[in-house]
Amino acid sequence: MLTVTSALWAVLTLAQADAPPPFDWRAYPACSEVEAYESESGSLLARQQETALLACQTPLDDPTLASIDARLAGDAFALVPDLQTGALTVLARSETEETLSVSGTLNMPLNPVGKGRFAARLRLADMDRAMVHLILSPDLDDETAPSLDWRGPNAPMNAARVGVLDGHIEHHEVFSPEHGETRRVQVYLPPNHDPAADPYPVVFMTDGAETAHFAHQIEAAIQAGDLAPLILVGALSGPAGVVEDRSDFPTDLRAADYLIGWYADEDRAEQHLTFFAETLTDWASAQFGASTDRTQRTVLGFSNGASFARHAGYLRGDVFGWVMAYSSGYGRLRSVEPFDPPHARFRFAAGLYEPGFKLSSELTHERLSEAGYDSRLTLFSTGHTRDVRDVVLADWLAEAYPQSAR
């Protein structure tokens, strides 16, 4: 699972603000602090304030060591949901750490409460539909630490998955003349794949290390008759996505590939867009019988990858007929240029508890809709995790590529 450090979270969400608000709306501030400000209706501050109140901190009731230990009941980590008040309390104990944080659905430090005890309480909007996955660690990037999951009684179900694939995953290397380097690509091919048969719908996915995870959802939908057999082409990201040694690259290579304007010294994002829209699409068609019809092509991404997918579909609607973007975070489409058709169709999703990503997705969706694009946004009671994709991806693909599509 991809996680987001505090520093990167700040960079990703800073672009949403033309001027910083008088409270840190991205860091789960105190509810009372956010509520204390008056903002002009419809202003960016009002939108930030509204977003911040979807997941904000409230005081703990007499958080004594004894009360925390009683709730922990011998465990090191506990979640205490209260659906009546819409509050989730996070409790932890450590005899060795001076600080503790949680990552996953919520990325935040816990408050020290006496020696070796930590706690936080958040008021969460629509908590009855919440999907919460938290990792406990002194380091927000440590995915080996203890984790806990909690779902509200009305939380959506994850898409069905097959246990063992009848199709298969292949690993390839594709030379990118745009980058001047060799890129690693994973490809899911559906059961009974025949490259000489009618062309297959195809999904081009950022962060291709996730290919196997989503192949199990895709195949379940194919087997259920909800989805036409399709190909998933996942281009790996960052240093792992490049065969040649890029250890000396001066900035975050994944961000440089995905985010226009991130790395001023090279046009990496423009190169990566051309690689996706030309080299990778041509290769998939020649190798696997992937369709050359733009309406049968999707570009898919999460987080920075979603920002890339959004721009790929926006700028290259002649190549991609569909954009599926989860939690797009870096910047937003401030205006929509009058590009000649064809235009991609956009499907956005985000969590109520990932402030900058949610607002970025909303504002982009609104700009596209106002300009007449086919755009839809679905919001879920969760944060910056895989949960959103595990719920909605199969439905989106079935809309784009029903069984009758091939």
Image (tube, helix red, strand yellow):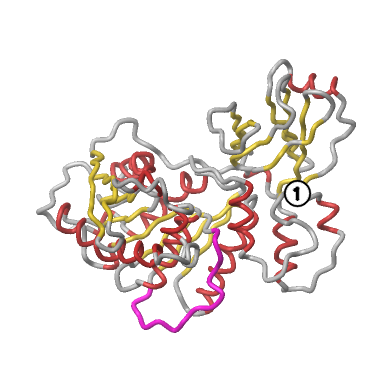
Please report the bounds of the magenta region as a residue range.
329-343
- What residue is shown at x 24% (from left), y 38% (from top)? 168
Q: Position of residue 282 (x, y in %)?
A: 20, 62
Residue 7 in the figure: left or right of residue 37 = left
Which of the pair 98/85 is nearer the observer?
98
Disc 1 residue type (three-letter) = Cys
Which of the pair 157/13 is nearer the observer?
13
Which of the pair 89/138 is nearer the observer?
138
Q: Position of residue 257 (x, y in %)?
A: 41, 58
- Report which quarter residue 346 is drawn in: bottom left
Q: Position of residue 116 (x, y in %)?
A: 77, 23
Residue 175 in magenta stretch: no
Residue 28 in the figure: left or right of residue 243 = right
In the displayed image of the protein, which residue is found farthest to the top? 74
In the displayed image of the protein, which residue is found farthest to the left? 196
Q: Which residue is mark 1?
A: 56
Secondary structure mostly seen in magenta is: loop
Q: What crowding class fits label 1: few (fewer than 14 Cα within 10 Å), some (14-19), or many (20 or more)? A: many
Q: Position of residue 214 (x, y in %)?
A: 37, 43
* Helix, strand or loop at mark 1: strand
Compared with 131, 64 (above or below) is: above
- Report which quarter residue 103 is drawn in: top right
- What residue is shown at x 64% (from left), y 43% (from top)? 107
Residue 332 in magenta stretch: yes
Residue 364 in the figure: left or right of residue 124 = left
